[in-house]
């Protein structure tokens, strides 16, 4: 029954090469020897990509997705065998692999997450990559909220400063204009504080103007 299932899952060429194996274990051992080895060049490429990967300008989700894609490719390139019984051997076998991937993930993080990274590494039992990712996502969300609120407050304060600065400039300009006007002396009328654009003798008298003997204009 088991041999039949194995043979049905294989291509015809491979079936012909293991057809006369006596047990399912013999078939599995033969296939493992032939196809269970890692491709050296591919393994080198994937490990190199992992060692060079950093978060950079990527958000946490994008950084994690890129790294997990390489891990998944590694899993298909090199099969990790472990015990399937109830002795707990499987967990013990996978734990070093999970810890190694957690360290790879933490190494590539930006330094803004340095404090949280240190807290994770100080735990007596290292969490899984997924658990660490969940903590980092929460931290990233809190940072985005803080930055958003801080940006709004900064923009409001900047607008207030600009408003007060503009009012001060306007006040200084009016004061300077009035001071300059009071010191002006129009040669034509011989009057202090009198400008040419307001001199009726130059621009003409309005129709309702009432003449007086003082001749102020």
Image: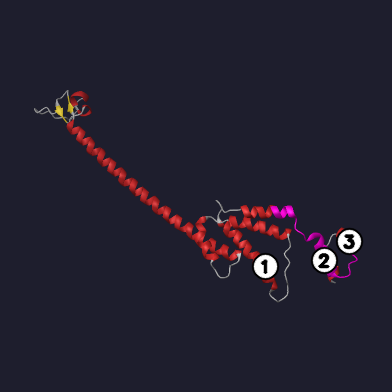
Residue at 37% over, 48% down: 158
Query: Image check: 18 left or right of 199?
Result: right
- Sequence order check, earlier mark of 3 and 2: 3
Q: Which residue is mark 1?
A: 94
Query: Is 125 one of the magenta-colored residues?
Result: no
Q: Which element type, helix, strand or loop, lies under badge 3?
A: helix
Q: How busy is the neighbourhood of tag 1: few (under 14 within 10 Å), some, or many (20 plus)? A: some
Query: Image check: 11 left or right of 125?
Result: right
Residue 138 appears anywhere in the view: no
Highlighted magenta segment, given as a residue range: 15-44
Spatial CA span between label 3 and label 2: 13 Å
Spatial CA span between label 1 and label 3: 33 Å
Residue at 63% over, 54% down: 51
- Sequence order check, earlier mark of 1 and 3: 3
Query: Eyeballing the image, is 171 above or below 61?
Result: above
Q: Quadrant of the C terminus?
A: top left
Q: Quadrant of residue 177?
A: top left
Q: Which residue is mark 3?
A: 17
Between 41 and 141, the residue placed more toward the observer is 41
Q: Quadrant of the N terminus?
A: bottom right
Q: Residue furthest left?
A: 213
Q: Residue furthest right?
A: 20
Magenta: main secondary structure equals helix
Residue 29, label in figure: 2
Q: How busy is the neighbourhood of tag 2: few (under 14 within 10 Å), some, or many (20 plus)? A: few
Mark 1 or 3: in front is 1
Residue 112 appears anywhere in the view: yes
- Sequence order check, earlier mark of 1 and 2: 2
Query: Is 23 one of the magenta-colored residues?
Result: yes
Between 120 and 171, the residue placed more toward the observer is 120
């Amino acid at each position: 029954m088991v041999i039949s299932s194995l043979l049905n899952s294989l291509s015809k060429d491979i079936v012909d090469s293991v057809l006369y194996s006596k047990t399912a274990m013999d078939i599995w051992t033969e296939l493992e020897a032939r196809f269970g080895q890692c491709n050296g060049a591919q393994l080198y490429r994937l490990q190199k990509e992992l060692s060079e990967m950093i978060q950079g300008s990527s958000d946490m989700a994008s950084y994690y997705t890129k790294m997990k894609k390489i891990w998944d490719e590694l899993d298909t390139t090199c099969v990790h065998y472990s015990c399937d019984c109830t002795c707990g051997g499987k967990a013990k076998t996978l734990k070093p692999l999970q810890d190694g991937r957690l360290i790879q993930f933490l190494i590539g993080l930006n330094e803004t997450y340095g404090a949280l990274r240190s807290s994770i590494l100080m735990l007596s039992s290292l969490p899984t990559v997924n658990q660490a990712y969940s903590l980092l996502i929460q931290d990233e969300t809190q940072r985005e909220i803080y930055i958003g609120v801080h940006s709004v407050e900064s923009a409001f304060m900047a607008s207030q400063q600009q408003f007060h600065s503009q009012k001060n400039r306007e006040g200084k300009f009016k004061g300077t204009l009035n001071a300059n006007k009071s010191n002006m002396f129009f040669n034509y009328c011989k009057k202090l504080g009198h400008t040419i654009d307001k001199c009726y003798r130059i621009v003409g008298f309005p129709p309702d103007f009432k003449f007086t003997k003082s001749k102020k204009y």
